[in-house]
Amino acid sequence: MKKIMLIIMDGLGDRPNDKLGGKTPLESAYIPNMNRLVENGIGGMMYSVDQGIVCGSDTSHLSILGYDPVKYYTGRGPFEAMGLGIMVRQSDVSFRANFATRDENNIIIDRRAGRLDEDPGDLCKALSMEIDGVEFIVKNGVEHRAALVMRGSNLSDKISDSDPHSVGKAPGTIVPKAPEGKFTADVLNKFLAKSRDILQNHPFNKKRISEGKLPANEILVRGAGMTPNIDPFQSMYGMTGGYAVGIPMIRGLANLIGLQEIKVQGMTGSIDTNYKGKIKAAVDGLAKRDFVLVNVKAPDVAAHDKNPILKREVLERIDEAFYPLLDILEDTVVVITGDHSTSSESGEHTGDPVPIAIASNEIRTNGCTRFDEKNCGISSFRIYSRSVMQYALQLSDRAEKYGA
Amino acid sequence: MKKIMLIIMDGLGDRPNDKLGGKTPLESAYIPNMNRLVENGIGGMMYSVDQGIVCGSDTSHLSILGYDPVKYYTGRGPFEAMGLGIMVRQSDVSFRANFATRDENNIIIDRRAGRLDEDPGDLCKALSMEIDGVEFIVKNGVEHRAALVMRGSNLSDKISDSDPHSVGKAPGTIVPKAPEGKFTADVLNKFLAKSRDILQNHPFNKKRISEGKLPANEILVRGAGMTPNIDPFQSMYGMTGGYAVGIPMIRGLANLIGLQEIKVQGMTGSIDTNYKGKIKAAVDGLAKRDFVLVNVKAPDVAAHDKNPILKREVLERIDEAFYPLLDILEDTVVVITGDHSTSSESGEHTGDPVPIAIASNEIRTNGCTRFDEKNCGISSFRIYSRSVMQYALQLSDRAEKYGA
């Protein structure tokens, strides 16, 4: 049995770009190690979820890991919370939240507290508390946005929002939408009452008022979502696993399915990450695990910045870091691919398929010798993201036989 | 309308093998007739059930014949019985069975009767009987293993096991798990009581006891399974059909869907089979039928023996036998493929796709000129096993129009 290394270069695929003479960043990059990987295996194209689907990183990573996003990507609450760096757990209830401004008559006069131009991290900390055995965790995102997670026993997402969804109204009292939501609604109402005192009197808001700004004296919550009941990776595949991932949402997902964190010095989840350190740590991490997931976010960042030149440079730096992968093919199935394509022209995700190489010693090769959109596109190999793990499993001689 | 010849070379696909200079057995074999077939048609790769699935012969044959294994491969009972050569029928109830040793206090002291080192075929014959209109058929497998089939009206698989699943206990009385199981439980209890007398006094066991061996004086049954309610081949496809198949499980399956046996002299279901006689009989069999299924087991046997050289030789002998196929392309769609890949390195089934050629006169060809993993892999044609019959049907101008 071999081990499996799954490396996802975020936003890997692209479209022909004028700034690169009509080539994609990958087509114009110098990537000898990726090319050697595809030569030593199967090269082709992966469809994220389905042909023509424009995936987010969340849905695509779920699917590549073998978890059907239709089943597990139910509410966005837990994924938003993971995206803000909260390691959500099974049976947590997560909410999207806004810092808002409430006047002395208890009326919401701004649902965004003036689009907060200051980091409300201290407010979030002040709202961390425990009530009736339920832990409340608040993390802020961009501007006024935040996430709230309730952690405890007997919680339910069958409750209403406090967000009135328009100004000129009082924040709503949380009511259960089903009998099992009563406890959660009661505890959350207690939290919201306490939070009003804390926020009103917090130095952060006193300062804002003194500066003539709208205070963030209310936290509006909406879209309660229970963490999906997701099978642990190890019980699905019979493999122990780790992850070297910088971006919070995928870290949260990896943590949720029970993968263990592999610490990497200088990992940022952006352009300036420590590419070599990350791949080395991932390879070293295979010594005591059967599976390692790596996500390198930088290509997606460069493409969102509409910078094809930078995306090409980033891909070349990743390729350099891939050198150690060539030495582990004897006992490892190495999969390199992306989660989706991101156009460096528009700066947006696209539904174009993503190059994939599945490399290992002693497996069939399919004559694909260059890892890019053009050559992987000419190759006949096509795979849907949902089959990637199964394909790697069978090549690592880990798949169970179906039948006799 | 053309006829259809479907030839399945068991365990056809393989992986690159050092003993063959890094080629697969098929890639290194001299197979001019297979190559002429693929030249005269469409060459590509078939996924058995799905990408990366490691199929058994049973699930794969079901799927290639157009029967969804998820629906029909429910319990293994009927398939185990077919594998031991019992031609199970609709509404039969099949069991896995063990010959076991029971002491004078009615306690099971060995669930495997000392792993029987003698052929208990005579015991099986002695247990063949009819009770209350129900026929009992017993066939032995490897060592202590056997299958029991009950054949009659109003039978049900909603009954318990007699197997206590551990030693030190008495064999269980069969009890119904639902009201409709009562008759079956009653008749089976009568059979088990009679079988104890027959087994205890059988010369086979008297001899064992005199030699100080554990007698096979109890037959433990478990896992009652009703034959799946499977549509006859003829009503599914509007074609009469026959089979030239050596291995018991696939013979049982072919028989179950109503294909007629085509007798072949010297057919063994192994390496020493009469390849030419089998293909000739299959071709002759097309004269009075619309469809013939052939299974040649030998490549799988050679691969399970980890003998790539032998597998190559076997493929060359099959190729020689294929000569008559070139003469029937005018009025026949000939499909040659495998049910799954089997690695001659590991001796195990793998989930790698299997080469397929669909040949006939006056159909599109796709430029594939060699029938092996490399060339069929480079070709762009991909098909899932579930679509093979439909594809052959439409090429034979037998498919019904979907829509107007």
Image (cartoon, coloured by chain):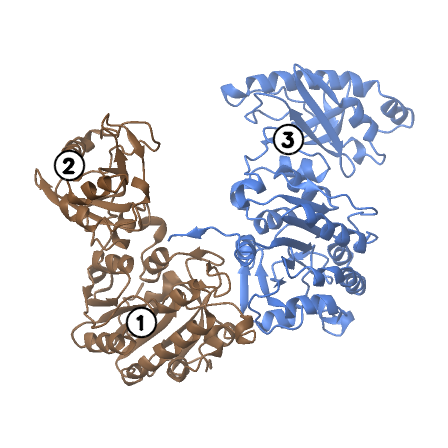
Chain colours: A blue, B brown
| SS at circle 1 | loop
Q: Residue at x 23, y 67 (%)?
A: B243
In the image, taking residue A17 as reference, residue A214 lies left or right, namely right
Rendered image quadrant of residue B99: top left
Other-residue count near label 3 (Cα within 10 Å), few / some / many at <14 / 14–19 / ≥20 = many
Nearer-N-terminus badge (1/2): 2
Frontmost of labels 1 and 2 is 1
Q: Position of residue A191 (x, y in %)?
A: 69, 18
Rendered image quadrant of residue A35: bottom right
Frontmost of labels 3 and 1 is 1
Rendered image: mark on residue B191: 2
Q: CA distance from mark 1 to mark 2?
A: 40 Å
Q: Residue at x 8, y 41 (%)?
A: B133
Q: Position of residue A322 (x, y in %)?
A: 74, 60
Q: Position of residue B170 (x, y in %)?
A: 27, 27
- Quadrant, the C terminus of chain B: bottom left
* Above or below, A379 relative to A253: below
* Above or below, A23 relative to B152: below
What's the residue type where badge 1 is placed? Asp
| SS at circle 3 | strand
In the image, taking residue B209 as reference, residue B115 lies left or right, namely right
* Above or below, A78 relative to B14: above
Which chain contains the residue that carries disc 1?
Answer: B
Other-residue count near label 1 (Cα within 10 Å), few / some / many at <14 / 14–19 / ≥20 = few
Frontmost of labels 2 and 3 is 2
Label 1 sits on residue = B272
Rendered image: mark on residue A244: none
Label 3 sits on residue = A94
What's the residue type where badge 2 is placed? Phe
